[in-house]
Image (cartoon, rainbow, N blue to C red):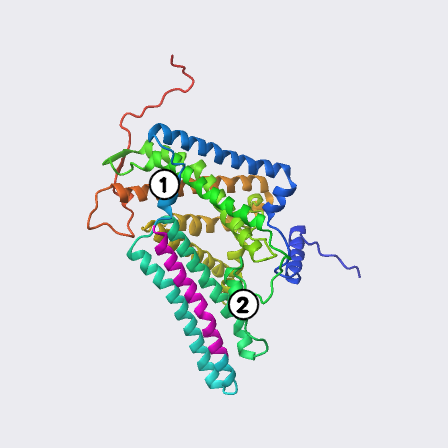
């Protein structure tokens, strides 16, 4: 008898090998961020970095010239930055409340562990105490979310300050959940001690949402690297301020002051937001996921700095969602997807992860802007979800074309975000106020009225008019 070897598809075989290697290798190892490696070792990427720096300098010069000509004084975007971080004292109080709640979890954990150790011989009491522990964590998490949400919904806080408060709120929620899950089995079998307070405090500020007792640590802190990354964060804040003042305000600051606006003006404004929108998108990614996280990793000697992967080269949306933010993706993978997938299936679990992530982003935007306008939720939770199966196989067969399609979606999507949120923001600011105005109903749908230009004509583009 002759044995026939079964032919295995190379992509499937490589995927199996990669999955086995990922399973065997530790999750946290010493490694640098991809952009750190590329900027240090590739002259081409370093040149692209310098291009973005030059764009920042050009915008700075443009802003200075505009301020001198139009206002007679130099502002260099400080007004927008101060306005965006307005009432920072109130924002600091809300953040301190969130930190206090997060710190209060630890003594609660110690009390729970001590009582459970006393009653571990009584099965019924242990079950009842477990229910009390779960309800206590849920109550703590609910308090952590409810108080800032109620405060921000009751009285609007400046945009940047609100973004910080709401992002930190969700970060602490996920940190507490990660520690509670990590300690669950330890408390049940009593085999391992719960984390010390120093471990818990380190985890609260470490750039990860997955709890481990030990992480790879560097030998020393390079304070020059820390200062450089924080300077990058500051520069990007002003970068976005320049983009706002040079591209958004000229098109949208008067939106709603007139009863009617031509559709062509709106469309032109939307396309004008495409380029600044994608630049802001790239700057936001670099600011948070590279500069900010690397600064804290350096200060805390956190050795694993793979906070993202090379998402910009991918041709499949599934790869993009995994690579864009590995910190949040790892938390959803461990605490949502892997818990639900064996019970309800992979497809439904993926859908729930997308909806939860989209809802969290929408809460941040709604509380920060002061109105509910689910543009990001539709782009992320509807169109983004539909692109998963559409690019699953075509992204492998046509990687260049699909990467081009992904970048096209980034440009159009960010242009729509910048224009639609600006339209709604200035509509609520400039249009007449009514008792029927609602937090959930967009005002830009009714004010101003968008009309077609009555004398639109088309002519032969090849006819030259002198």
Q: Residue furthest bottom?
A: 122
Residue 317 appears in the rendering: no
The residue under label 1 is: 79
Residue 74 appears in the rendering: yes
Q: Is residue 290 left or right of residue 172?
A: right
In the rendered image, the quadrant that contains the C terminus is top left
SS at circle 1: helix
Q: Which residues are magenta?
A: 87-113
In the rendered image, the quadrant that contains the N terminus is bottom right
Q: Which of these two is toward me, 57 or 340?
A: 57
Residue 269's place in the image compared with 285, above or below, is above
The residue depicted at 62 percent of the width and 60 percent of the height is 216
Q: Residue 170 at x, y = what percent? A: 43, 59
The residue under label 2 is: 198
Magenta stretch contains residue 250 = no
Q: Is residue 462 left or right of residue 390?
A: left
Q: Residue 212 at x, y = what percent? A: 57, 65
Residue 122's place in the image compared with 336, above or below, is below
Q: Is residue 153 left or right of residue 213?
A: left
Task: Determine contact: label 2, label 1, CB under 8 Å.
Answer: no
The residue depicted at 37 percent of the width and 41 percent of the height is 80
């Amino acid at each position: 008898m002759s044995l026939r070897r079964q032919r295995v598809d190379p992509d499937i075989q490589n995927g199996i090998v990669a999955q086995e290697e990922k399973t065997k290798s530790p999750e946290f190892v010493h490694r640098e961020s991809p952009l750190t490696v590329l900027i240090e070792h590739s002259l081409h990427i370093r040149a692209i970095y310098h291009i973005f720096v030059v764009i920042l300098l050009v915008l700075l010069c443009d802003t200075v010239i505009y301020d001198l000509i139009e206002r007679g004084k130099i502002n260099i975007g400080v007004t927008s930055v101060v306005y965006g971080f307005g009432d920072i004292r109130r924002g600091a109080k809300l953040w301190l409340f969130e930190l206090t709640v997060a710190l209060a979890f630890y003594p609660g954990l110690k009390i729970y562990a001590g009582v459970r150790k006393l009653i571990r011989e009584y099965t019924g009491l242990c079950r009842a105490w477990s229910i009390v522990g779960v309800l206590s964590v849920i109550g703590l998490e609910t308090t952590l979310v409810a108080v800032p949400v109620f405060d921000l919904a009751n009285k609007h806080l400046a945009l940047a300050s609100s973004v910080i408060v709401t992002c930190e709120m969700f970060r602490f929620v996920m940190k507490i959940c990660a520690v509670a899950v990590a300690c669950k089995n330890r408390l049940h079998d009593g085999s391992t001690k719960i984390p010390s307070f120093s471990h818990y405090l380190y985890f609260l500020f470490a750039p990860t949402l997955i709890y481990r007792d030990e992480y790879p640590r560097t030998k020393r802190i390079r304070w020059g690297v820390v200062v450089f990354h924080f300077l990058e964060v500051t520069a990007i804040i002003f970068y976005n301020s320049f983009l706002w003042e040079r591209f958004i305000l000229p098109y949208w600051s008067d939106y709603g002051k007139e009863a009617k606006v031509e559709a062509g003006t709106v469309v032109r404004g939307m396309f004008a937001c495409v380029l600044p929108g994608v630049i802001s998108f790239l700057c936001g990614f670099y600011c948070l996921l590279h500069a900010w996280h690397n600064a804290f990793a350096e200060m805390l000697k956190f050795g694993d700095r793979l906070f993202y992967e090379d998402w910009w080269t991918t041709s499949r949306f599934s790869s993009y969602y995994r690579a864009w933010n590995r910190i949040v993706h790892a938390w959803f993978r461990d605490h949502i997807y892997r818990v639900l997938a064996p019970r309800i299936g992979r497809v439904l679990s993926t859908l729930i992860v997308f909806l939860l992530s989209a809802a969290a982003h929408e809460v941040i935007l709604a509380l920060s802007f002061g109105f509910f306008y689910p543009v990001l939720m539709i782009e992320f939770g509807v169109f983004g979800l539909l692109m998963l199966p559409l690019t699953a196989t075509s992204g492998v067969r046509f990687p260049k074309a699909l990467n081009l399609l992904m970048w096209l979606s980034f440009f159009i999507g960010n242009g729509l975000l910048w224009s639609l949120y600006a339209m709604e923001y200035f509509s609520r600011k400039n249009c007449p106020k009514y008792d029927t105005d609602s937090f959930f109903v967009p005002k830009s749908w009714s004010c101003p009225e968008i009309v077609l230009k009555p004398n639109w004509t088309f002519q032969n583009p090849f006819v030259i008019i002198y």
